[in-house]
Image: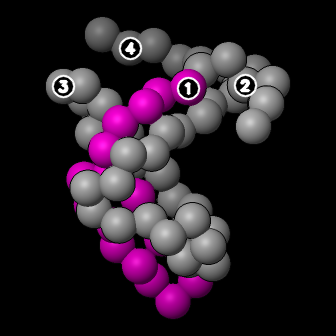
């Protein structure tokens, strides 16, 4: 699969919470976690399960950094 996003974070599904419409997916990426909201349909289509290897793609015109 080729995509234009440059930021690919590969990790392991740590938590998956399915709602009626949306799914909250938390990936463990090294020592960090990233959480994304996707549709429940997408989570089911991908067959996501805790422990699966997965990746998050990010593409944004603005990134905020704080300290």
Q: Earlier in the sequence, mark 1 or mark 4?
A: 1
Judging by the rendered image, the residue that carries numbered circle 3 is 31
Judging by the rendered image, the residue that carries numbered circle 2 is 5
Mark 3 or mark 4, which is nearer to you?
A: 3
> In this view of the protein, can residue 13 be seen by the observer?
yes
Q: Can you give x and y, in whole percent of width and height, for residue 3 in the image?
A: 79, 30
Judging by the rendered image, the residue that carries numbered circle 1 is 8
Are dots 1 and 3 in contact, CB under 8 Å? no
Q: Earlier in the sequence, mark 4 or mark 2?
A: 2
Magenta region: which residues? Answer: 8-25
Q: Please tell me how crowded label 2 is: few (under 14), some (14-19), or many (20+) other residues with Cα within 10 Å.
A: few
Q: Can you give x and y, in whole percent of width and height, for residue 46 in the image?
A: 57, 65
Mark 4 or mark 2, which is nearer to you?
A: 2
Q: Earlier in the sequence, mark 1 or mark 3?
A: 1
Q: CA distance from mark 4 to mark 2?
A: 23 Å
Disc 4 secondary structure class: loop
Judging by the rendered image, the residue that carries numbered circle 4 is 66
Q: Is 2 left or right of 38, judged from the image as shown?
A: right
Q: CA distance from mark 1 to mark 4?
A: 21 Å
Q: CA distance from mark 1 to mark 3?
A: 16 Å
In this rendering, is residue 29 above or below 65? Answer: below
Q: Earlier in the sequence, mark 3 or mark 4?
A: 3
Q: Please tell me how crowded label 4 is: few (under 14), some (14-19), or many (20+) other residues with Cα within 10 Å.
A: few
């Amino acid at each position: 699969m080729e995509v234009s996003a440059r930021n690919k974070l590969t990790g392991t599904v740590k938590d998956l919470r399915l709602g009626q419409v949306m799914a909250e997916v938390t990936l463990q990426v090294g020592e960090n976690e990233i959480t994304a909201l996707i549709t429940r349909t997408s989570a089911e289509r991908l067959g996501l399960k805790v422990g699966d290897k997965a990746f998050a793609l990010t593409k944004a015109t603005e990134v905020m950094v704080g300290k």
